[in-house]
Amino acid sequence: MSLTKLTTSALAIAALTATTAVARDNVQVAGSSTVLPYASIVAEAFGENFDFPTPVVESGGSSAGLKRFCEGVGENTIDIANSSRPIRESDIELCTENGVNDIIEVRIGYDGIVFASQIDGPEFTAFEASDIFNALGAKVLVDGAIVDNPHTQWADFNSDLPAADILAFVPGTKHGTREVFEDKVLLQGCEDTGAMQAMMDSGMDEDAAEDACIEVRGNGITVDIDGDYTETLARVDSNPNGIGVFGLAFYENNTNKLKVATIGGVEPKTETIASGTYPVSRPLFFFIKKAHIGVIPGLKEFAEFFVSDEIAGPDGPLSDYGLVSDPELEATQTKVSDEEAM
Amino acid sequence: MTDLTTTPTPGGKRHSYGSLLDESPRTKKRNAAETRFRVYGVIAISIGLIFLAALLFAIVRNGIPAFTQTYIVMDVELTAAKLDKKGNRDIEDIKKVSTFGYNPLIGTALETLVAENGVETEINKGKELRDMLSSGAAAQVRFAVIDNPDLIGTTQEFTLLAGSRVDGYMKGRVDRESLARDPNLSPAHLDIVDALAADGTIKRIFNWDFITGTDASESRPEQAGMGVAILGSFFMMLVVLLLSLPIGVAASIYLEEFAPQNMFTDFIEVNISNLAAVPSIVFGILGLAVFIQFAHLPQSAPIVGGLTLTLMTLPTIVISTRASLKSVPPSIRSAALGVGASKMQSVFHHVLPLAMPGILTGTIIGLAQALGETAPLLLIGMVGYIATNYPDGVASGFLDPNSAMPAQIFEWAKRADPAYYERAWGGIIILLVFLLTMNLIAILLRRRFERRW
């Protein structure tokens, strides 16, 4: 490097440090509160195993995190955004506008959601999304008309199902799981049964129809559980007819008490969730700002550590906490080490 | 006129009520009303005291367990073949062995420990036994080895953190029935815990780490501490003190002693009184807009929290300072002016020193209020942040992201693990100790220096 180049770069660095308050030496992460526990577990282990300082992890929600991520490039913007949804076109536009061009998308694993009931209870072993909608939706389609849900037993609308009273314990609205339950099950069932079409025909616009589709009946037939899965399990345990919504990992640890139902004929398993054939799941992501790699010390090491087999693999601490490990983890690891942007 | 005053008729109206010592119906009524009022007062105070006692009882009962922590004392063989494969004790090579490399050693050590104690159990694999320990235990051993590589090849005694379920069992929060539904620990582990606790291998000791330590991830409540949040609060209070005391005192002296009485100063006075009553969340959103979005100060940093809380504390300080300046008698000012002091000399040499105890008391009360404030911190990102790093120095203390005590308590109370719930109560005890100390200092200052005229 020539002397002039060296001086210019030294000056540039000096100017840069002068404008920003202090040089940042830690990785900053923000975003989804679903990913937060996983990210904080990794950050803690990272701090223990490397000479870099422990990354700073904040929550705030997927959208807020991506918005901060797209604010621009530089030490006063975050390096990694956690997200429980894929990045949207609008996020990418905002990023491009602010000069954040190269984004590395990293899928850390899946959050799988299952329907399970008491092991000695009625034979709830196979559901379709439409069954769940017919049983739990606030308004359903009966004989071509949209009416308040009249069904009291599962057999009322599908003779293959047991003649047992309908009772379901669903995640409360503050849970991220609730959104998946609404989008992937209720909305799907609403479309499958034709209720959505009927609502739109009756003059509702699409958004209003979607909102009506995801409404549950309440009234003691659906019970919102705001606590964790242990509470749902306790409720299912004391109600033979009850159906509970659980995370896959939780169900797998309680197979002595629960039996799981297939959705659309697919059994929820790590493989089916990972391949996407089991419909009620969502991938979890984080996004890395490529421009920060090499500038912020430890950023790449942190990303690599996050997706390493020891952490994100099937026996790692993330899986212990409930993440469905990604079977294509190896591809993700290569992606991170090659810094392959979207 | 004389007959009116000297000869009151014995059977006249004024004496119809008899002796003064006999209560008339009206006196009785008045006395009864007074007694009733006293009873109401006593009832009101008793209700207040009962609530206070219930609150303190709940805080102490729920929070005290957080101040002790369960540890397992065990010998760990630091096998050279695993920890330093090349055998040349190079620190860089030793650092390459991650905590995952230490886990098997701890597992083996636990197997030995269980076997030595003759505990009958169906769990005999180190990996499963390790569920009894915190996942931070491996890091404890690793740090010890990195600090002193000579330990490799020897067997050392370690006091390792037990997992939150074992800790909960020792504190009576977890029982076998609840564990039957818990994937993290099985009742069979508790049999081992019982046996080891009997001979003192598992013990509960005072938990300094809770006061000085850092926050931990959701899977390790046993490791979480308030230390970083206390530092965050400290730096915030420093900002508040350094800004609000001079600005507040200067503003009040000018308004009280020098400013002309006109529409404009009246307008300012009304505004200061109104500001003192503005809900703190309003200052939070102001801080977000001005300090973070406009001035681009770092998010979650104590300096932003301090600036926001300064806005909130200023009116309190101005009001109390003006009150204590007002309480200095005008004769002091007149006397000073009379012997030829200038206006400024009379204020700074005579009025201000006499008003100082009141000013300091007001400032400390204002700071105590700011210390416990949570709402503005929600908006500037000091909540929802995991405080795992100590600041490196003074500059980073102000500028690096941090949490604050009340924000940390809120964060813990939100987390799913019941062990965090206990820590939230413990955090409240620490916060209350700080607040009580500050109030005590305020009372002592007032007692010691206050002048009465």
Image (cartoon, rainbow, N blue to C red):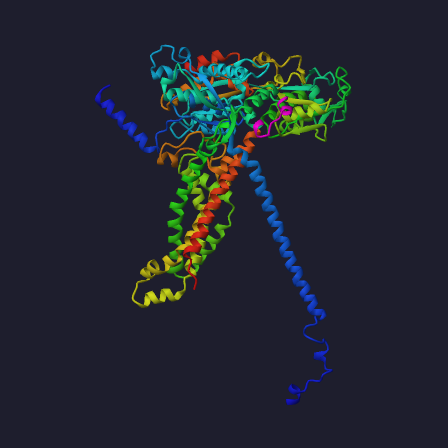
Residue drawn 68% across the image and 72% down it: B21
Query: Within the image, what quadrant is residue B128 found in?
Result: top right
Q: Position of residue B36 (x, y in %)?
A: 67, 60
Q: Quadrant of the N terminus of chain A?
A: top left
Q: Position of residue B247 (x, y in %)?
A: 38, 50
Query: Within the image, what quadrant is residue A268 found in?
Result: top right
Q: Quadrant of the C terminus of chain A?
A: top left
Query: Within the image, what quadrant is residue A169 found in?
Result: top right
Residue B196 lies left or right of residue B145; in this view the side is right
Give the mark count: 0
Q: Is residue B244 visible?
A: yes
Q: Residue furthest left?
A: A3
Residue B241 lies left or right of residue A143; in this view the side is left
Q: Position of residue A204 (x, y in %)?
A: 67, 29
Q: Is residue B172 magenta?
A: yes
Q: Which residues are magenta?
A: B169-180
Whether residue B234 is situated above or below residue A255 in the rendered picture: below
Residue B148 lies left or right of residue A252; in this view the side is left
In the depicted view, which residue is nearer to us: A25 or B64? Answer: B64
Residue drawn 61% across the image and 47% down it: B50
Q: Is residue A204 visible?
A: no
Q: Position of residue A132 (x, y in %)?
A: 69, 21
In the depicted view, which residue is nearer to us: B322 or B234? Answer: B234
In the depicted view, which residue is nearer to us: B434 or B359? Answer: B434
Q: Is residue A243 magenta?
A: no
In the depicted view, which residue is nearer to us: A136 or B369? Answer: B369
